[in-house]
Amino acid sequence: MKSDHLPIDESISLANEVFEDVMKSNDLVKGLATIEPYCDRSVYHRFIQSLYFVMTAMVSIEKEDIDVAQKAVNELREIIMRSRSQWESEASRLNFESSVRLANGVSHLVISNMPPKILRIINFLGIRGVESTGWNNINKTAFELPGIASQLARVFRFIYWTYFDTHFGIGPIHIDICNEVLTKELNRYPNVKLNSEYIPGKNGGIELYLRLLNDPHVTPKRFIYMELTWSYALQSNWDSCIEYAEKFRTGSLYTPAIATYMEAIFRYAKSTENDDQDEKQKATELFHLVPTLRIRHLGKTITPEKVAVVRAQEYVKNDELLILPDLGMLYEINCLSFIRSDTVLLNRILERINKYVNRYQCDLDTSDYLDNYLTAIFYKDFYPIITNRENVSKLLSTMNLVLGVSFHFQRKPTVNWAYAALRELGLCTAKQGTDHNKLEEYRKQWLKNINIDEKGYEKVLETEEEVGN
């Protein structure tokens, strides 16, 4: 080990102190300035710095940020190769293991859930991803190993429980345990900016994003534009929604087709609500533009982009008509869950839905508007249920109606939503996890120990001292 390198134990301890201070004070700039002098002498300080740059690059997708992140990762690799020769302690080994397992677990999950066509190419190159292996590594990192990687793994697990489990119906819903965990975490960090008032759709969330736009240290502006677009869409504030959708689209490197489709559907929503023909003309021009902007990766178009292209083409083929496409997108990315308890915002949405239900309500055997009616009735019966999960029998009747006449469809998004709704209600348990008993043990352990933080680095050091004595 180089003499000018911080001892690993000291490096880990100082890095964790900076992490805790940032969580308590929200002063990220101060945290980065604090670790800067140690970055050439400490693996873990360099790790935190490079992690910040990588996350910034992931959300901004800007060339400058990507270059900075790449340089930081290279410097991290160099300091590891220069300094790592042997384990200074069991604590350093465990922290290293937690980081490796987190990276390995995320890699397995990403690869195993790639579209089949791309996955075949990746497998041909000798790269494999096993979903169960990914979750095993993430669970072990989150609940059995110490360090910052462990905290990141717990955040990843929590997001998965609250978002993916509930929306895609691939696992049990644990609202109570998530609420309890979140409450206890917020008690540990009372000043952290991650509270219920800062979620999309809430005024507090919008105010936070607007403040971040004025912060010179925040670089992923385009990501914030996207978040503001969704937030204003949940409030049916079409002028502000379109303003930030246009900013997000202009020069977007995320995916031009999806960015253009987003602006198009929100302009279309404003035109239908206000009978604004100028806005509809702008939306139509954008819909025509979407198919020309698709990007192919390895000769294939990613699924979300393909969906945007297909629906833009449907608009053109269907005489410039779509049924509440903005709500369709908000449902599919689960944004509507953010306003489950906000009756004012939900009532605005339901008023729009009822207009379409009344417009297309008719005899199902002879109607030329069957798809339009089924889409509207799906919205009407499903949205109240995601707020309080009541009247399930009424939704089941609607789902049977949608699925029973699906052969009439020329377009079938409503059929896919119907199946997703059944999964979300717990009536379909496809793709459940492999070891629910073990996962439940982890959840209980997390709740039990979250206040004493026994998985932290200090606990590991105490154990080492006891063994040494």
Image (tube, helix red, strand yellow):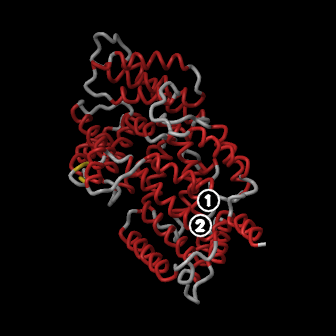
Tell me what residue is drawn at x 58 percent, y 82 percent. Answer: 38
The reply to whether discs 1 and 2 touch (Cβ–Cβ < 8 Å) is: yes
Q: Position of residue 84 (x, y in %)?
A: 52, 79
The residue lying toward the viewer, choosing from 295 and 105, is 105
Q: Residue at x 47, y 76 (%)?
A: 76
Distance from label 1 to label 2 (Cα)? 7 Å
Secondary structure found at label 2: helix
Whether residue 79 sits left or right of residue 457 in the image: it is left
Q: Residue at x 31, y 38 (%)?
A: 277
Residue 162 falls left or right of residue 229? right
Q: Which mark is residue 185?
A: none
Q: What is the x, y in percent for residue 241?
A: 44, 47
Q: Which residue is mark 1?
A: 145
Q: Which residue is mark 2?
A: 95
Q: Position of residue 250 (x, y in %)?
A: 33, 58
Which image quadrant: the N terminus? Answer: bottom right
Residue sitting nearer the eye, 459 or 232: 459
SS state under label 1: loop
Q: Position of residue 444 (x, y in %)?
A: 68, 43
Determine crowd level at label 1: few under 14, some 14-19, many 20+ residues with C-alpha closer than 10 A: many
As displayed, is residue 143 above or below residue 462?
Answer: above
Establish if 352 lies above or below 250: above
Classify mark 2: residues with Cα within 10 Å, few (<14), some (14-19) or many (20+).
many
> Which residue is pictured at 48% across the width and 52% down the height?
227
Q: What amino acid is found at the position of numbered circle 1 in the picture?
A: Leu
Q: In the image, what residue type sits under mark 2?
A: Asn
Residue 304, located in which quarter of the rendered image?
top left
